[in-house]
Image (tube, rainbow, N blue to C red):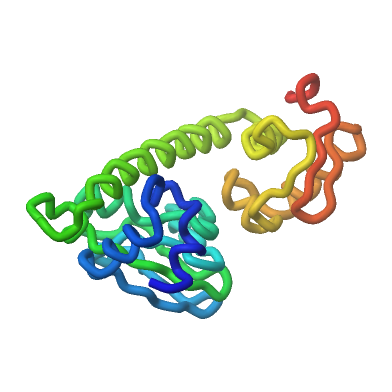
């Protein structure tokens, strides 16, 4: 598929798959592509889903309603990442989350039933895609473990610093994928409390930030 491969080739789902091999898989596994406008819903909570989504461009937000009826951001999936793989592979009858376009985006859909049809004699590179899918799911599981660690912290300050530690990947300067409202939802806070705590951390010389760009100054010594 002209143009699509170059946009998604960095997705680990397509590791060790060349452009010609991708084109072969695209045809024999009946991939499909759909475009979405900002805030347009891709999957609703309760939907039956049978496809894995790959973000060709743009990003999507995965949200879940809590007991109080508030919408909590589970994660943001940006180009060229994949979403829906855990729910589809687990055989969930109903999608437990809502997936919406965070901005104008294009999604490549892969039908799980076609992908796992190991008796197919036409897609010779299918096994690479299946192996890669298992690795993607494992990495997502590690991410969820990190989120559990973040939200289990006792104070809001500890949650913020723990999140920044994970997001930094060892760097002192980096950008995060969330705005204030999305970050507050992600770590289980409200926007005003988050903004106030970030301001305190900056005044104390622990971090510097401007919008979603952060610099870690003294995070190791002041995490409480």
User: Total of numbered circles in the picture?
Assistant: 0
Left or right: residue 67 versus residue 180 is left
Left or right: residue 49 versus residue 80 is left
Q: Is residue 158 visible?
A: no
What residue is drawn where x is 41% and y is 63%? Answer: 98
What residue is drawn where x is 46% and y is 33%? Answer: 145
Q: Position of residue 100 (x, y in %)?
A: 47, 68
What residue is drawn where x is 38% and y is 46%? Answer: 16
Indicate whether 119 appears above or below 1: above
Q: Position of residue 210 (x, y in %)?
A: 84, 52
In the picture, the quarter occupied by the C terminus is top right
- In the image, 80 versus 215, the foreground residue is 80
What residue is drawn where x is 90% and y is 33%? Answer: 204
In the picture, the quarter occupied by the N terminus is bottom left
Residue 32: name its quadrant. bottom left
Q: Position of residue 15 (x, y in %)?
A: 40, 46
Left or right: residue 202 versus residue 73 is right
Q: Position of residue 42 (x, y in %)?
A: 40, 71
Indicate whether 204 appears above or below 185: above
């Amino acid at each position: 598929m002209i143009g699509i491969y170059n946009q998604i080739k960095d997705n680990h789902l397509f590791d060790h798959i060349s452009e010609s091999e991708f084109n072969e898989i695209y045809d024999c596994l009946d991939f499909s592509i759909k475009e979405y406008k900002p805030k347009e819903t891709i999957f609703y909570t309760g939907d039956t889903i049978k496809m894995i989504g790959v973000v060709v461009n743009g990003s999507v937000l995965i949200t879940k309603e809590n007991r109080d009826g508030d919408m909590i951001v589970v994660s943001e999936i940006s180009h060229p990442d994949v979403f829906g793989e855990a729910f589809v592979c687990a055989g969930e009858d109903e999608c437990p989350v809502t997936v919406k376009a965070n901005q104008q985006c294009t999604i490549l859909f892969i039908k799980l039933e076609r992908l796992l049809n190991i008796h197919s004699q036409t897609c010779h590179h299918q096994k690479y895609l299946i192996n890669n899918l298992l690795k993607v799911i494992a990495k997502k599981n590690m991410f969820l473990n990190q989120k559990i660690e973040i939200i289990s912290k006792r104070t809001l300050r500890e949650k913020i610093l723990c999140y920044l530690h994970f997001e930094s990947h060892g760097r002192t300067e980096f950008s995060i994928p969330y705005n204030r409202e999305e970050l507050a939802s992600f770590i289980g806070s409200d926007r005003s409390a988050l903004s106030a705590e970030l301001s305190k951390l900056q005044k104390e010389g622990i971090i510097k930030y401007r919008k979603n760009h952060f610099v870690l100054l003294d995070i190791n010594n002041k995490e409480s």
